Amino acid sequence: MNEKIEERIMEKMEILIDRIEFINENISDEMMENRILKKALYKEFQEAIEAMTDICALIRRGLNSSAKDDYTNIDFLVEKKVIGSKTGKKMKEANGLRNRLIHEYDGLNDMLAYESMKELVNHLKSFSQEVLKWMKKES
């Protein structure tokens, strides 16, 4: 993988880890009663997922394959054993939640979003650890 792509991956990884830390520090039942906190956490989650999907696309390009849609890129990382299949499945779920948060398809169930974010943030952390481990092995 070329150095410029590795640099971009690490920049996106810093963003991802920062967003994960913010979510972990601030997610609580209070979010359901505090509109500002809820919107802030939704935004941080969206940015975390955008960083994750950017990392997937960058890795795919770095492995000499054209980046495609987010779900296909995640599948590609599973296929290439960059991330595990469970992590891949959870990253697809996270991307789906991101889409619901942004577009509010059929309204948004805040309690369901809150519960999903609490679970998925741990899988985002696993994603970052798996990618970093793979990058270290590849270099």
Image (tube, helix red, strand yellow):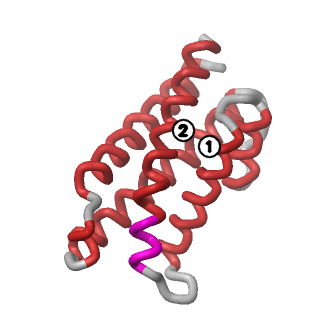
Task: Tell me if 17 is positioned left or right of 69 in this view.
Answer: left
Please give the name of the residue rendered at 76% of the width and 50% of the height, measured from the top-left corner.
72
Q: In this view, does 69 lie to the left or right of 99?
A: right
Q: Quadrant of residue 93?
A: bottom right
Position of residue 69 relative to residue 64, above or below, is: below
- Type of amino acid under label 1: Thr
Q: Based on the picture, tell me whether residue 59 belongs to the magenta stretch.
A: no
Q: Nearer the viewer, residue 118 or 14?
A: 118
Q: Which SS type dominates the magenta stretch?
A: helix
**Label drawn at residue 49:** none
Quarter of the image containing the N terminus?
top right
Estimate the x, y position of residue 58 in percent, counting from the top left: 62, 36
Bounds of the magenta segment = 110-115
Q: Which is more toward the observer, 98 or 34?
A: 34
Q: Which of the two labelled residues, at mark 1 and mark 2, occupies the earlier sequence position? A: 1
Query: What element does badge 2 sit on?
Result: helix
Q: Label 2: few (<14), some or many (≥20) within 10 Å?
A: many
Quadrant containing the C terminus in the rendered view: top right
Check whether the beta carbons of the residues at disc 1 and disc 2 lie within 8 A of each other.
yes
- Front residue of 92/13: it is 92
Where does the image place residue 128, in percent across and percent down from the top left?
A: 49, 35
109 versus 128 height, above or below: below
Q: In which quarter of the image is residue 84?
A: top right
Residue found at x 26% / y 63%: 28
Q: Which residue in the structure is indicated by mark 2?
A: 127
Q: How many marks?
A: 2
At which x and y percent is residue 109? 45, 82
- Amino acid tagged 2: Phe
Does residue 19 appear to the left or right of 28 in the view shown?
A: right
Name the residue beneath numbered marker 1.
Answer: 87
